């Protein structure tokens, strides 16, 4: 029995026990001429042939001939909840101002903080919904979302409550990131802000289950390694799992810290050292790489994806969607930077945006692959094969999106 039967499909299953490590990322578990049966929001079978036996009680048959069927994309790192935009910084950047210069002069993150604080709950919700709509259209079905533009008790809680209450098909995994910048009112009292997080905000957020993860911007001029460590450990004490913005711009030793704390993931890693990568590997920390940010910051260098894959690590990819360093909701856009900037193959890119990114947010047993028993989060791409998606870049290949077993985006050409 099935509610939906997809047939005649080239199915990219991304099947895996656990995250795909290193060379395993090249194997997408492709089934040529296969079927997927969906019942009650769950994938009930996947196999070769037409799935004849499932036609007994189908409500919908999708003929996916010439299309590519793959798991819904999982974006494991976004700064989804914020207000306003920062196109004004584009010109400053082109004239040579660095990201940290803009931040120190009260712009950057801090200007988004002012806009986010001033936005009502409803306005913030509307903005989040319009971003989620775009994500869904471009094939993302699960997203991690961080707070970090409130930077005080009320507005951090407001941001996480927006994420908790928003009604949208996309599943959201929430992260508290109060340690995103030091707010202006604590400019000369960073310790005071750290104490506010440690003494009040983290306990409140954990006790009210407003976040599952904690994250921290460990960067020169933002939070040091030891400051990051004390903030993250406080989160851990309250049951939050650890993520970390590590070695994005300067080699701070963030990757080592992620290893030492056995973080679930460490993000960016553009400047991560060999020792840092080794320590992450030994501790099983998933590297979440954000090549769109390297490109958009004009860093001229990318995280060393090839080194990590060759070391056998399970690389994941994310947008880093935020109004400063990567203003795009589209994981498909990130594919080309991962491939051209970091040398990842299309197969590695897809593993990194499905099964590995699901593991980077602790959802690897629920989403990220087309396997029996997993959520029916499936996208159908108007592309003949997986290479084509990365090759023909900058456009949206999504034809159909199935989320929790429901068709939420319909194939315009086949209705
Ligand atoms: O991941 N690095 C810190 N946070 C974001 C940028 C946030 C912003 O500029 O608004 C990032 O790059
Ligand atoms: Fe980020």
Image (spheres, rainbow, N blue to C red):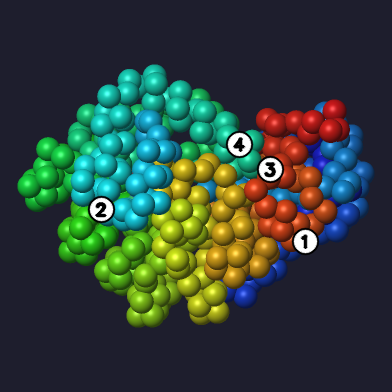
**Marks 2 and 4, how far apart at CA:** 34 Å
Mark closest to the chain's N terminus, 4 or 1: 1
Residue topped by disc 1: 30
For the residues labelled 4 and 1, the Cα–Cα distance comes to 23 Å
Crowd tier of the residue under label 2, counting other residues whose Cα lies within 10 Å: few below 14, some 14–19, many 20 or above: some
| Residue bearing mark 4 | 136
Q: Residue furthest front?
A: 95
Between 342 and 32, which is closer to the camera in this rendering?
342
Say whether mark 1 is within 8 Å of ligand 2.
Answer: no
Residue that label 3 marks: 396
Please identify the quarter of the rendering in which residue 162 is found. top left
Q: Secondary structure at mark 3?
A: loop
- Residue at 71% across, 58% down: 391
Q: CA distance from mark 3 to mark 4?
A: 11 Å
Which of 67/204 is in front?
67
Q: Are marks 4 and 1 in contact (CB under 8 Å)?
A: no
Residue 396's place in the image compared with 291, above or below, is above
Q: Which residue is mark 2?
A: 101
Mark 3 Cα shell of 10 Å, populated few (<14), some (14-19), many (≥20): some
Q: Residue at x 27, y 24 (%)?
A: 118
Which label's residue is closer to the chain start, 3 or 1? 1
Task: Indicate the secondary structure of the residue bearing disc 4.
Answer: helix
Mark earlier in primary sequence (3, 4): 4
Quarter of the image that includes the C terminus: top right
Q: Position of residue 167 (x, y in %)?
A: 50, 25
Q: Mark 3 touching mark 1, by CB under 8 A?
A: no
Provide residue 61's location: percent of width, then percent of height.
86, 35
- Looking at the rendered image, the disc whose residue lies closer to the viewer, 3 or 2, is 2
The CA span between labels 3 and 2 is 35 Å
Q: Rounded to the nearest whole Å, what is the CA distance between mark 2 and mark 1?
A: 47 Å
Nearer to us of marks 4 and 1 is 4
């Amino acid at each position: 029995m099935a509610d939906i039967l997809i047939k005649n499909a080239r199915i990219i299953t991304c099947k895996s026990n656990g995250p795909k490590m290193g060379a395993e990322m090249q194997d997408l578990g492709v089934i040529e001429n296969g079927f997927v049966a969906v019942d009650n929001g769950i994938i009930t079978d996947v196999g070769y042939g037409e799935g004849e036996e499932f036609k007994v009680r189908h409500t919908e048959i999708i003929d996916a001939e010439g299309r590519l069927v793959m798991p819904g994309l999982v974006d494991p790192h976004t700064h989804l909840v914020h207000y306003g935009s920062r196109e004004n910084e584009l010109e400053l950047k082109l004239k040579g101002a660095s990201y940290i210069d803009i931040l120190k002069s009260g712009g950057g993150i801090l200007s988004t903080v002012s806009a986010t604080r001033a936005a009502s709950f409803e306005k913030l919700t509307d903005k989040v919904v319009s971003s989620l709509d775009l994500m869904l259209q471009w094939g993302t079905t699960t997203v991690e979302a961080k707070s970090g533009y409130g930077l005080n008790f009320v507005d951090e809680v407001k941001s996480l409550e927006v994420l908790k209450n928003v009604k949208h098909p996309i599943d959201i995994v929430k992260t508290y990131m109060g340690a995103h910048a030091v707010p202006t009112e604590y400019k000369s009292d960073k310790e005071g802000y750290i104490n506010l997080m440690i003494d009040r905000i983290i306990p409140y957020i954990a006790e009210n289950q407003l976040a599952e993860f904690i994250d921290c911007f460990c960067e020169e001029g933002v939070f040091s390694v030891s400051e990051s460590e004390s903030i993250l450990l406080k989160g851990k004490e309250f049951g939050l799992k650890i993520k970390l913005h590590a070695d994005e711009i300067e080699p701070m030793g963030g990757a080592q810290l992620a290893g030492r704390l056995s973080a679930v993931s460490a993000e960016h890693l553009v400047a991560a050292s060999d020792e840092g990568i080794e320590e992450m590997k030994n501790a099983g920390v998933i590297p979440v790489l954000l090549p769109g940010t390297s490109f958009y910051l004009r860093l001229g260098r990318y995280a060393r994806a090839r080194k990590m894959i060759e070391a056998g690590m399970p690389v994941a990819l994310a947008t880093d969607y935020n109004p400063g360093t990567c203003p795009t909701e589209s994981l498909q856009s990130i594919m080309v930077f991962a491939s051209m900037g970091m040398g990842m193959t299309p197969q590695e890119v897809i593993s990194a945006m499905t099964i590995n990114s699901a593991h980077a947010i602790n959802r690897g047993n629920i989403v990220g692959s087309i396997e029996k028993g997993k959520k029916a989060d499936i996208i159908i791409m108007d592309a003949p094969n997986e290479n084509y998606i990365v090759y023909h870049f900058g456009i949206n290949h999504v034809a159909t999106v199935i989320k929790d077993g429901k068709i939420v985006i319909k194939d315009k050409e086949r209705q």
